[in-house]
Structure formats: structure tokens, C-alpha cells
Amino acid sequence: MTSRIPFLAVALLATAFLNGCSTPKSLYYYGQYNSAVYSYFKADEVSIDEQISLLESIIQTAAAKNKAVAPGIHAHLGMLYFEAGNPGLGTQHFEQEQRLFPESKQYIDFLLKSVKDA
């Protein structure tokens, strides 16, 4: 019986160690969002329409995977729609960002004011 205690202790420690090393699952779906942000700052390489398509694809994939869209995606998409000359869709995505992430209200209000003043 005493020989089982060290084995059990080692097994429990190994299990705890292996569980601690596992990659945590994200609460949000990001898809290729990093690429989209990079493309935005390198606008000469990728058109606004291509950037919009990438972000729309991320949102659709998140829905298909039943995952929440990552913070910032709708706001970024809204900015792109404003730049593309579609303020209606831009406003919709800003409002969606605000609904999903109420803590973004001040920032979204700032963005809306900025695009309306421009």
C-alpha cells in the first residue's frame, strides 16, 4: 500500500503539469485579424475592398464556428466602410462593436464624431 502513494503522487503531479502546459482556448475568434491590421497599415499592398472581405470572412467564420468575434473587428470594419464611402455600414459596425463590447463606448463615440467631422 505504501508503494502506491509515491506512484499516485507522481501521477497527480504529472497530470497537473500536463494540464498546465495545455494551450488555453480563446474566448474570441480572431482568424486572420493580425493580417488585416497589418494590411491596413500597408494600404498600398492590399485594397480597402480586400481588407473588408477579409474582415467579413472572419465574422462569418466566427459565426459558423459558433464563436464570439474578437474585440476590435467590427470597429476596424466600420472604419474601412467609412473609408470606402459607405457610412451606413460603417455606422452599423461601430454600433455592433459597442453592443458586443460596452466598454468600447467612449472610443466608438470618438470614432463616430471623427468621421462625422471629417
Image: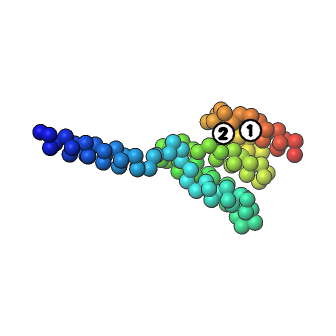
Q: Residues within 10 Å of mark 1 (few under 14, many from 20)?
A: few
Alpha-carbon distance for marks 2 and 1? 10 Å
Residue 114 lies in what quarter of the image? top right
Give amino acid for label 2.
Glu
Q: Residues within 10 Å of mark 2 (few under 14, many from 20)?
A: many
Where in the figure is residue 57, as x and y percent of width and height?
58, 53
Name the mark nearer the viewer: 2 or 1.
1
Residue that carries the numbered disc 2 in the rendered image: 97
Residue that carries the numbered disc 1 in the rendered image: 107
Which tag, 2 or 1, sits closer to the chain's start? 2
The kind of secondary structure element at disc 2 is helix
Residue at 74% over, 62% down: 43
Where in the figure is residue 84, as x and y percent of width and height?
77, 54
Where in the figure is residue 5, as x and y percent of width and height?
19, 40
Q: State the residue in front, 108 or 5.
A: 5
**Which quadrant does the N terminus fall into?**
top left
Residue at 26% over, 46% down: 10
In the displayed orientation, state which residue is furthest to the bottom.
45
In the displayed orientation, state which residue is furthest to the right.
117
Q: State the residue in front, 19 or 66.
A: 19
Give amino acid for label 1.
Tyr
The kind of secondary structure element at disc 1 is helix
Residue 5 in sight here:
yes
